[in-house]
Amino acid sequence: MMRLVTTVVVVCLLVGCGNGDDGEISTSTGPGLPVSIGTWSVCVTINELCTSVTICQPGTDNCQTISDVLVDIGSVGLRVFGSVVSTPLSQTTDAQGRSLGECAFFADGSSTWGPVQRADVVLGGTRAAGVPIQIISATFGGQSATSNPCNGTVDAAPDEANLNGILGIGLFRQDCGPVCAVNNNNTLYFACAGGSCAGTSVPVLEQVQNPVWLMPSGNNGVVLSLPTLPATGAPSVSGSLILGIDAAASSTPVAAVIPTDPNGFVTTFYKGTAFPQSIIDSGSNGLFFPDATILSCAAPLDSFYCPPNTVNLSGAIVQVNGRQITVPFEIANANILVGTNNAAFNNLGGSFSTFDWGLPFFLGRTVFIGIEGQSSNLGTGPFFAF
Amino acid sequence: MLGMASLIGAATTVVFLMIPLMLPPVWAALGGPAGTVERDRVMMKGQRQSRGGVGYSVDTITAAGMQVKEYISPDGTVFAVVWKGTGIPDLRLLLGEYFDDYRTGLSRRRTPRVRGPFRMKNDRLVIERAGHSRSLWGRAYLPSHVPTGMKPEDIQ
């Protein structure tokens, strides 16, 4: 991935990524939040889909727009590095006046630490007031990147994490929910004072929130549309993120509605085996699944598959009616993909013990993400549809 | 009896809170003796359930929206640990002497950054992490201690 990252940066320097005239592929699905890959200065990882988000001091016009924010269907809540925030926000506290902080954990093994603060969040022209978000700050509460309550090293800087922030707009209203409202030892929320932090419970509405469900309209979920790519990828791609499901659902054919289990998992059948803890996650940059017949790459790309020839495969995801919808996909040799110097690929994959339908799944599709408890013309969340 | 158990539990907590600072590897859960499961339960302030199986047994600890399963081989060694829930349990506690391997594996994925589910795998140790907000899961096992006839996919 060092090579992946470095290569992309060099390409951007040489040809000017983001000009939109060097083979950029885009969809035109109407109004929404523009999202893209390969057009950013901090989001430089392959298949890293990012956008810009505006945050404001609550109730004021004192706002700033933060670029290079990962569009993440696999997490919940807006998180931005404190080092890029210049707008004063309001710190949340517990009943004793101690500052609330959080450890957020991600599937890639990374974690973020920092205070929970309230901001007005503007997405595509719509504004949600007083949304609890996480300010990523390794030194909050007297902690450090290597010594903190998060079980390991936390992200310390945008250039290291390859993002300025994470826009978590997944299946749920909050990142924890009822469990963290009643348990002090939930391992996510902490109350900090005098340089030390202790586990604490936090009422559901004071936890870090999915900003979408707090919007005055378009709050039942999001619709992510990305274009189809050729087998050799593209230097950049642009698509759209629409808030609210119903308008797009009336104009876009929907082949399948996939309700998730209470934990947000779906079931994938692959080569005769069921994987009931499958996820659909735009924040993962490949399709990750178990197949011992496909060669993995040598280090440092050993998280990815390197078949000698591209393989045509398919998985089947279980729908609302119990029927399965087949999702065809291809896996190409990651070494060869990297050699193209492109930034976006629909055929990048790697080995894992269950199914992670990452960013390539979203390419060439319009995917609907329904938030828990919010009703729409496609049903009540949590669900995926496409 | 209940009062007695609570007293013992409280005393145990104090003792173990002090000792890991000096002697962490001895108290390892993964790779350690079955007796360490009870220490983990006390530290997690959780409930514990044991279930026998063919060729191994499983102890399940539940606490604060999390579930931890510890797999124990016939010779009494914890050969696998599986966790799932809204949070992540204290992996320094559960991985014991393997925690440093885990941290090394994590840092290898940070620079350069890999955006996919976490996996580290060698002859000695396999650790995976995945899931998403509201439901994170992970597992760690020692391939050479997995009982004959048991497959890695049975550890979940």
Image (cartoon, coloured by chain):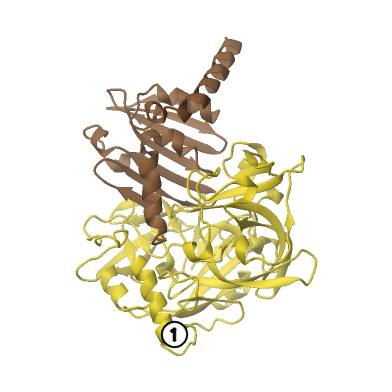
Chain colours: A yellow, B brown
Residue shown at the point (42%, 61%) measured from the top left? B115
Residue A19 seen by the camera: yes
Residue shown at the point (29%, 66%) measured from the top left? A313
Q: In this image, A225 relative to A228: left or right?
A: right
Residue B136: % across, % down: 48, 47
* Secondary structure beneath label 1: loop
Residue A159: % across, % down: 49, 66
**Quadrant of res B109:** bottom left
Q: Nearer the viewer, residue A251 or B139?
A: B139
Residue A71: % across, % down: 53, 67
**Quadrant of res B150:** top left
> In the displayed structure, would residue A87 be above or below residue A277?
below
Residue B151: % across, % down: 26, 40
> In the displayed structure, would residue A152 be above or below residue A235?
above
Name of the residue lying farthest toward the right? A59
Residue A72 seen by the camera: no
